[in-house]
Amino acid sequence: MSKIDDLLSAYKKQVSLPWADLLSAQEKVWFCVYDPSQERRLRKQIDAFAITTQESGHAWLPLDVTGIFDQWLATNDYKEEYFKNPSDLKYEENTFLEFFSENIGKLTEGADSSTVIALIGIGSFYGIIRVSKVVEHFVKTIPVPGRLLVFFPGERDGKNYRLLKARDGWNYLATPIEAEEME
């Protein structure tokens, strides 16, 4: 079995468990943690995650956020200045997060308490904005009636997550889903 198959098995165990209704928004977040080198394999297997979700009696709503920063930047009046001095983008984080919430929020309107909203492509935010800010903003501004599944290319040490194994990690209340180590 491949690492992604092992991850799918771990996900199947998690999605098949009974869901508690009285969780905070942060507790409804699942991080599917995998090695960044497995990104293409994971994307090739996304349909298997959808089928597993549906077989467990839940709806599947995939949201690929890979190009959303590009879309936001293309509409920004100051994009040329940002190309000259990318460090100025840090002052636009809130504007980007509002754009993110507005656009992604529209796509989640049909989600119910049995829906898995799956964020794919979160690694594309590396070097632009911290994933912790995106996820925290998501759960504060977009209703997550079911579960938010974040496909996370990186690693986890305890509750500390590191995107692409490079960035300083952060502690998050999400439920981790990882491939089990086979000996």
Image: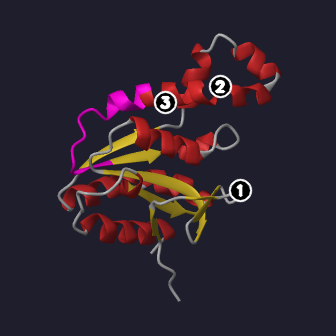
* Residue 82 point in image, percent of width and height: 75, 21
Residue 114 among those drawn in magenta: yes
Residue at 45% over, 40% down:
138
| Residue 41 in the image: above or below residue 118 | below
Q: What residue would you read off at disc 1?
A: 168
Q: Gap in Å between the C-alphas at discs 3 and 2?
A: 12 Å
* Residue placed furthest toward the left: 57
The residue mark sitting in front, 3 or 2, is 2
Q: Disc 1 residue type?
A: Asp
Disc 1, SS? loop
Residue at 60% over, 17% down:
74
Residue at 57% over, 72% down:
158
| Residue 136 in the image: above or below residue 74 | below
21, 36: nearer the viewer? 21
Q: Gap in Å between the C-alphas at discs 2 and 1?
A: 21 Å
Please say if the residues under marks 1 and 3 sit with CB atoms less than 8 Å apart: no
| Residue 165 in the image: above or below residue 70 | below
Q: What residue would you read off at disc 2?
A: 92
* Residue 12 point in image, percent of width and height: 31, 67
Sequence-wise first label, 3 or 2: 2
Q: What residue would you read off at disc 3?
A: 100
Residue 59 among those drawn in magenta: no
Q: Which residues are magenta?
A: 102-116
When asked about the image quadrant of residue 35, the answer is bottom right
Q: Disc 2 residue type?
A: Glu
Q: Residues within 10 Å of mark 1 (few under 14, many from 20)?
A: few
158, 9: nearer the viewer? 158
